[in-house]
Amino acid sequence: MKVLHVINNLSIGGAETMLSAIVHTMNKRKGIKVEVLTLARVSSHLVDDIERNGVKVHNLGMKNRLFSFFYILRLVKIMNRFDIVHSHLFPANYMVSIASVLSCGNRIVTTEHSTHNSRRGFKALRPLEMFIYSRYDAIIAISDGTKEALATWLKKNHKINVVPNGIDLVPFFSARERFKSNRDDFFNIIAVGSFSHAKDQDSIIRALTRLPASVSLTLVGDGPRQDELRALVNTLNLNDRVDFLGLRNDIPDLICMSDVLVQSSHWEGFGLTVVEGMAGGIPVIGSDVPGLREVISDSGFLFTQSAELAEQIFKLSTNKELYSEMVSRGLRHVQQFDIERLVDDYLTLYRNVS
């Protein structure tokens, strides 16, 4: 079986990071011939990691999201060499769907990564979206919430399969052993994600004002709202308690050196970061939204307001028994999100549609 994964680019993000782990596992552990195609070229450590692991990365060379017939033809030429073509994110899912009209001999699959996107705000786009998704032989939703949102939008769900996201647990387990630390008077919150409206780091920053000075916050990532977030930190006089680390490729280490992970998204298809927190052996807290609610279950805390978030963080920082219990729950719960399980589910689905 030859598999091609198609994604917009390999910038640092949840879907992109997960794809890196998927292709590595398919290639090295499952013996599947797998390659990756990006629409646009973006330099990142993910590209280096994937190629270092023996997986070829193609690039269409698109300069923006306005694709032309020229790019469709280039995509068709590459797709025709594979049995399965698996797309991720918009507009890659549109490109593969349209190209499938001209390609031959392969099956196409797409993964829906979020419960929300701006296109669903325009009902006039529904017929187009229904056509795009109808071309796929199978649709994967990363959570029940993602499936429900997509099925409601498309008014059908017969081809939507739920396959929860997964991560490679080994780097987190290894980092946990390296960074075992004695809990002291300092307590650090970590949040990993793009600085965008969806991720709502504002709520964590505001929660910090309700917590003792011994509680600090580390923000990992970048994005269009970075200046706004820095301004908020400055306005609330929290400059000495909040660190902006930018993009990093040592996430397992950073998580295992922290005390609690918070993901405060307005919406989330799954919440890969909270899985990483559990694997890193620290308690996790997420906003009470579909996706996060489903993934966290009873293995972490959910909140709706900054005041509630601050209260949960304070309890974890002052109650050692509660802290240990939440760590244990997370470590048990995270076993179901192993990348090996996800890849096995993908391969089973590929065989069913072939």
Image (cartoon, rainbow, N blue to C red):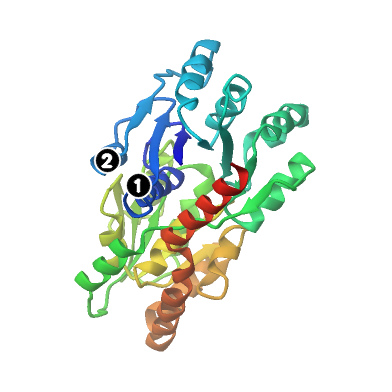
Q: Could you tell me the amino acid type at mark 2? A: Gly
Residue drawn at the location 27% of the way across and 73% of the way down? 186
The correct choice, above or below, for 235 with respect to 154 in the image is: below
Task: State the residue lying farthest toward the right.
Answer: 155
Label 1 with label 2: CB-CB less than 8 Å: yes
User: Does the rendering let one see residue 271?
Assistant: no
Q: Nearer the viewer, residue 351 or 77?
A: 351
Checking the image for residue 47, the label placed there is: none
Q: Which residue is mark 2?
A: 54
Task: Give residue 324's quadrant in the image.
Answer: bottom left
* Tally of marks: 2
Let me know if residue 121 appears in the view.
yes
Looking at the image, tell me whether mark 1 or mark 2 is earlier in sequence order: 1
Please, is residue 75 above or below residue 211 in the view?
above
Are there few (<14), some (14-19), or many (20+) residues within 10 Å of tag 2? some
Q: Amino acid at mark 1?
A: Asn
Q: Left or right of 98: which side holds 344?
A: left
Q: Quadrant of residue 187?
A: bottom left
x and y percent of residue 294 in the render?
60, 64
Residue 296 relative to residue 4: left or right: right
Using the image, tell me which numbered label, if any, was put on residue 27.
1
